[in-house]
Amino acid sequence: MLDKRSKRVLWIFGIALLGIVITELVRPKPIDWRPSYTSVDKIPFGGFVIFEEAATLFKNVEVKKIDEDPYEFLTDSSYTQNSAYIFFNDELFFDERQADEILKYVENGNTVFISSRSMGYILRDTLHINTAANYSILEEELHPKFFSPSLKQDSLPSFKKGVFKASFVKIDTLKTTALGYYENTENDLGDLNYVKINFGKGQFLLHNLPEAFSNYYLLKGNEQYAANVLSYIDADTIYWDEYLKSGRKVVTSPMRFVLDQAPLTWAYYVLIGGLLIFVLFKGKREQRIVEVMEPLENTSVEFTKTIGDLYFQNKDYSNIIAKKITYFMENLRSKYYLNTNDITEDFIKKLALKSGNTLEKTQKLMHVIKHLKEKSVHSEADLLELNKQIEAFRL
């Protein structure tokens, strides 16, 4: 039984722990402003709203969520022709394999839409474009517009919080069509933020303002701008990328999920704390008897000695000599990586050098082995001489 002092300490510890848990549960959860863009995240820069509205934006078009690497999807599956693959994230980088498959996909008559401040040097070099991003805090709001007069909206879209300005500074004017730009800027080319590039039978739609598709800006009155951007996509099937996302959960173990949820995290900590207290006080009063475990006997040595004695008693010296030579040669092959099929003078020199034995000792041993291999009948003296030479040779 616990004394009064120990009970008092436990009560104080339990009340303090309960107070911490209640405080954490009722405390307002801070807003997570990290970029995510996944279709399940409802944080400001998640992509929950845009994915939920995809069916409205693309009427009578099938929208499929792709959770695998673009390379694997485009190589392992039969995608629909006249389809569009949509990517948007704060930063994108397509490696060589991904870029090759995406280029083939577009070349076959499909559309790839990318909204990101960067997309990797492979696509940039292939499409002959270049982008520049300013990662300093914006002093003024960004007001993106379209060159097409038919794309109008009731209010001018504005972007500032959590946004970094990115634009195209180099394009291939023969294959590129400018679709959108930032208003109130000096350099027209440097202000382009939306272009279309013809490639093969298909086209790339490249956009530099991924924040336009985030939950925060879609719920802040900029939904018409996002709809206008996506209106350039004309396809029978939409493939919605969920793999190249900043918020993609890479580790999916149960403990990762528990530690990501505040209530489950604190429940886990309380459980661990309770178990530690239980072990601490229970272990001081009781201890299980430790059983004596007899070590397992190593019978391999006795077995080897028995087999050796049988050969020796039957005076089968030739068999013993053959096995000792085979075992010794195997040691040389595994330790010094030498070819032991032919005992030549070159082999003897290499063995002496690698083993650290003198050339004379090595030659003597190898000559004995070679001589015994050539003999058909062996005596006890031959076995003793071989064993003496092998024991004297330093491996």
Image (tube, grey):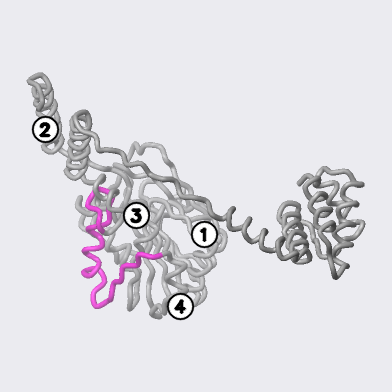
N-terminal of the pair, mark 4 or mark 2, is: 2
- Kindly identify which numbered label has been placed on residue 248: 3
Graded by Cα atoms within 10 Å as few (under 14), some (14 to 19) or many (20 or more), the crowding at tag 1 reads some
Image-quadrant location for residue 304? bottom right
Using residue 339 as the reference point, say whether residue 69 is left or right of it: left
Q: Residue at x 23, y 54 (%)?
A: 218
Q: Which residue is mark 1?
A: 95
Mark 4 residue type: Gly
Q: Earlier in the sequence, mark 1 or mark 2?
A: 2
- The disc at residue 53 is none
Q: Amino acid at mark 2?
A: Leu
Where is residue 132? Give x, y as percent. Answer: 48, 48
Q: Earlier in the sequence, mark 2 or mark 3?
A: 2
* Badge nearest the viewer, 4 or 1: 1
Vertical arrangement, residue 287 with respect to residue 132, above or below: above
User: Mark 4 or 3 closer to N-term?
Assistant: 4
What's the magenta region? 40-68
Which quadrant is the N terminus positioned in? top left
Q: Position of residue 357 (x, y in %)?
A: 84, 44
